Amino acid sequence: MNNLVIDLTHGGVKIAISLAKKGKNVIAYDIYNTLESIDAKMLAIYNIDLIQLVDLADFKGDMNVIYPIHLPLTHEEIISYNPNLNYTFQTHHEIIGELLKDWALDIPKIEITGVKGKTSSVFMLKDILIDENPLILSSLGSIIYENGKKIILKRNISITPANIKETIDLAYKIANPVCQIAEGVVKSEHLRKYNSAIFESSLGVSGIGDVGVLLNIAEDYPIAKGRSSASEAKRQVFRCETVVCEKESFDRYYQNIKHDKVNTFSLTDSTANLYLKNVDYSLDETEIDIVYNNIKTVNDNVISGEMNLKMFAPGKHNVSNVMGVILTSIALEIPQDKIINRIKNYKGIPGRTNKKQIKNSIIIEEINPGINTKAIEESVNMISNLDDYYVAIGGDYGITCEEIDEDKVSEFLDSLNSKIILTGDVGKSISQKTSEKYPVIENYNDVYDIALKNNKNLLFIYRSDYRKLSQR
């Protein structure tokens, strides 16, 4: 059988080489023409030929097409180049699940997807599982924690499914350095430094997770040139043995799913397996009471109970993320005291949702590559007294699959009686659609200076890559 790997931009090179190492016949199609020379050389080393789809006419027999879930081509379009082949199709998520089906069966593995809150949830779970030396893939990089110490495996890495395999391979190299193997210091016996794993993914999961987490479908944005959607792609979470899912998303998109171990959470719906009984929001420390019923665990037990927690979660969307993390922890049968204490100690991620004091000004940052209309509204709504704040909104385009509905954002801003500042490319574009004329600041760093100079607090909502903002 021939295996055609499509899309070498979003992890296809790693997938192609992984298959070739297993003795598979592999060919590749660089649909976006972005293949770097070093990757082309690696493909050549493993005898992986680059083709165009018209070259399919030269093949016979079976053809397994491996493609990203957001592929802008239909199966029918691919088949049309040679209708006589016997085709099968697998997504990048599915092939990674297949490649890793026997990997680390003895440790807890979590895969997290959703439109909002993925990275924050990864690091909350990291804090809870810190004693298990977690291996992590997130939008902040590939990381392993050893005895509480962070070891960065790779900074600039995306959350495509192929990079789950990349993260695992990088961790293996750390545990089995070639130089020490050659010197006899360690033996290459698949040694590892981690005892748990948490993987973030943007459009679904591979299915290797003991728990697959779907945090929300805050906005069901289109993918694959409008032929599919975020909710359809994230349906892949139900490949995991145990699933944690926001109840509103489950009820709207997945009621037809047949799965024995689905646990739901909700801020408002008491029919969810875990729901919010009471909440006292605060920018410093929010307190919640939750009730959980009939939680189906990874060990096939069923758990019910109540919990009181205090944590940094200033808005509804933050609390929703916390509840997804709590439900995941319960499904893993993590002791309640550990959940309560570790959640309380979580203070947010610098450059994401976090609060700090600079001179006399309170600075609340909501920085995320996936900031969209709903996220902007929720961030503004978590401030009880906007009179004391500047609200700065802006960012960059082309960061994630989803984009901002500028018309809706413009209407929302015009409805506020607040001091609005717009910044970045997103801010410039929004400024052309608002009825009110708000100041546009090109350099986002200047927004902080303006707030401090005028002795004002600042809510800073910015759509950008964490690495870019961390340079300030």
Image (tube, rainbow, N blue to C red):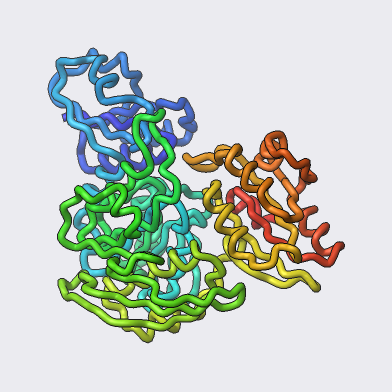
Residue 352 rendering spot, x and y as whole percentages: 58, 60
Residue 368 rendering spot, x and y as whole percentages: 56, 53
Quadrant of the rendering where the N terminus is positioned: top left
Q: Measured along the vertical axis of the image, is residue 358 above or below residue 309?
A: above
Instruction: Report the side of 145 relative to 470 (left or right).
Output: left
Q: Measured along the vertical axis of the image, is residue 422 above or below residue 352?
A: above
**Which one is nearer the viewer's eye here, 281 or 263?**
281
Instruction: Report the side of 88 relative to 448 (left or right).
Output: left
Residue 118 rendering spot, x and y as whole percentages: 44, 57
Instruction: Report the side of 424 relative to 406 (left or right).
Output: right
**Which one is nearer the viewer's eye here, 36 or 213?**
213
Quadrant of the rendering where the C terminus is positioned: bottom right
Residue 139 rendering spot, x and y as whole percentages: 49, 54
Q: Measured along the vertical axis of the image, is residue 355 above or below residue 89?
A: below
**For the point 44% across and 64% down, which residue is it?**
321
Q: Residue furthest right?
A: 453
Is there any visible trace of residue 190 in the rendered image? Answer: no
Is there any visible trace of residue 392 in the rendered image? Answer: yes
